[in-house]
Amino acid sequence: MGREFLEIFSDWSEDYDEFVEGKDPEYQEVFKNYDRILNELVSRSGNSIIEFGIGTGNLTLKLLAAGKTVFPIEPSREMREAAQKKLPTELEIIDGDLQKYPKPDRAIDTMVSSYVFHHLTDKEKALVLKDYALQLEENGKVVFADTMFKSKAAFFQKLNEAKKQNFYRLAEDLEREYYPIVSTVEQLFEEAGFDVDVQQMNDYVWIVTGTKK
């Protein structure tokens, strides 16, 4: 993930679970249906998984509970510490990100993440998807849930709404990071050799499933 945002994300570690539970009004709509989103990621995943940017480990817990093997990756030391309190002690959380991470010593059939892919520019997104495709066998999957927008007009509508509601942290977030347009993400997946499916989960978040051809 774009490590230029690491300090911001690390500072979020103590409060992150309160955000996803909808306790912060600025981010309620972003995390609406959060549990359903994570469950959908689990159901779309295979059995041997790399999870990028595990944060405090909410998706990791669900993947493990479903009997899946997880290779968890997280660049933030603070987030790793928060996640380790929830996860089995024998599960090692790896210091890495979407671009740079040690490869597991076992075959992987799915790469998954939640609320992470927007840390990369579109150019970086294209490069990592091509790298993921090289690691997956036919029908292997990349399953990402993240904030993205149907069009630039839709993005600016949400940005303006945030400013009108005095949601300044949300507005700053939208302007700072690399939230993509859905059609761009579809194109990047297709160019990397995936069949792609997208499903909108709330006003901000979509799930993208890429299946290697």
Image (cartoon, rainbow, N blue to C red):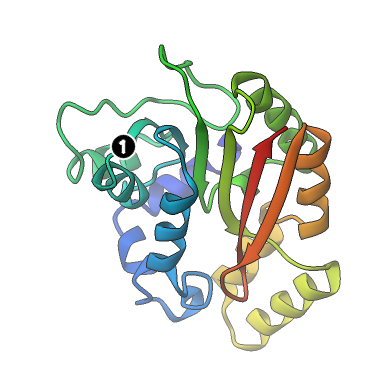
Residue at image coords 27%, 40%: 67
| Rendering quarter of residue 168 | bottom right
In the picture as drawn, the residue positioned furthest to the bottom comes out as 164
Q: For numbered disc 1, what is the local secondary structure?
A: helix
Residue at image coords 51%, 34%: 110
Decide if residue 54 is on the left or right side of residue 57. Answer: right
Find residue 140 and report its horizontal and vertical position in percent.
58, 32
Could you classify mark 1 by the number of other residues whose Cα lies within 10 Å: few (under 14), some (14-19), or many (20 or more)? many
Eyeballing the image, is 109 above or below 33? above
Q: Is residue 122 visible?
A: yes
* Amino acid type indicated by mark 1: Arg
Eyeballing the image, is 31 above or below 195? below
Quadrant of the frame with the N terminus: top right
Decide if residue 24 is on the left or right side of residue 64. Answer: right
Residue at image coords 23%, 28%: 91
Quadrant of the frame with the C terminus: top right
Find residue 200 and report its horizontal and vertical position in percent.
63, 68
Residue pointed to by mark 1: 80
Eyeballing the image, is 205 above or below 86? below
| Rendering quarter of residue 138 | top right
